[in-house]
C-alpha cells in the first residue's frame, strides 16, 4: 500500500471508529470498577495521539482504531482489574486485560481514568504484546 492509499485507509478507519465511539453517549455500568464509565473526546483523542499530544505512528493508529468495537464488550464482561495505579495524587488509572473475539490469541488492555473525585472515563485501548 502506498502512502496515499494508507492515508485514505487510515482516514476511513478513523471516521468509522469515531462514529462508533461517538455512539457511546450514555455512560455504561462497569462491574469491574463498580461505577459508571463515561466517554469523552479525550478518550478518542488518546487513541490517535500519545500522552504528550503527538500523533501516533499510522500503524499504531490502525491497531488502536480497529479495537474501538471491543470497548463495550470488555466493559460489560465483568473482567478483573489487572492494573491499578495513580499517576499523580489526583489521577488514577485502571487496566482491564481481555482476549478479543476476532482473535482469541490477541490480548488487549482497556484503560480507564479518573481525575480527582470526578467521573471515571474511558482513556485508551491497546494491543498487548503476547508471545
Image (cartoon, rainbow, N blue to C red):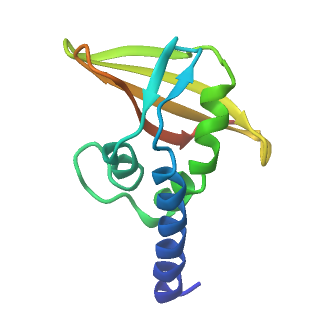
Q: Examine the rendered structure and indicate whether residue 88 appears above or below residue 61.
A: above
Which residue lies at the image location 52% right of the left edge and 11% below the top edge? 34
Q: Nearer the viewer, residue 24 or 90?
A: 24
Image quarter of residue 43: top left
Which residue lies at the image location 78% right of the left edge and 42% below the top edge? 101
Q: Residue furthest front?
A: 26
Image x and y of residue 126, in percent = 53, 42
Q: Nearer the viewer, residue 26 or 39?
A: 26
Image x and y of residue 60, in percent = 48, 56
Image x and y of residue 73, in percent = 67, 35
Q: Nearer the viewer, residue 50 or 15?
A: 15
Say whether residue 74 is left or right of residue 13. right
In the rendered view of the protein, which quadrant contains the C terminus? top right
Which residue lies at the image location 33% right of the left edge and 53% below the top edge? 49
Which residue lies at the image location 46% right of the left edge and 79% below the top edge? 7
Say whether residue 111 is left or right of residue 113. right
Q: Examine the rendered structure and indicate whether residue 17 appears above or below residue 10.
A: above
- Looking at the image, can residue 9 be seen? yes
Say whether residue 59 is left or right of residue 89. right
Amino acid at each position: 500500500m502506498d502512502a496515499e492509499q494508507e492515508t485514505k485507509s487510515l482516514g476511513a478507519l478513523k471516521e468509522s471508529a469515531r462514529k462508533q465511539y461517538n455512539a457511546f453517549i450514555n455512560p455504561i455500568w462497569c462491574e469491574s470498577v463498580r461505577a459508571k464509565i463515561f466517554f469523552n473526546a479525550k478518550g478518542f483523542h488518546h487513541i490517535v495521539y500519545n500522552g504528550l499530544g503527538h500523533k501516533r505512528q499510522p500503524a499504531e493508529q490502525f491497531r488502536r482504531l480497529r479495537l474501538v468495537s471491543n470497548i463495550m464488550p470488555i466493559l460489560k464482561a465483568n473482567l478483573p482489574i489487572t492494573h491499578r495505579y495513580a499517576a499523580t495524587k489526583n489521577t488514577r488509572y485502571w487496566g482491564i486485560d481481555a482476549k478479543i473475539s476476532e482473535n482469541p490469541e490477541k490480548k488487549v488492555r482497556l484503560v480507564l481514568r479518573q481525575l480527582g473525585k470526578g467521573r471515571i472515563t474511558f482513556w485508551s485501548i491497546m494491543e498487548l504484546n503476547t508471545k
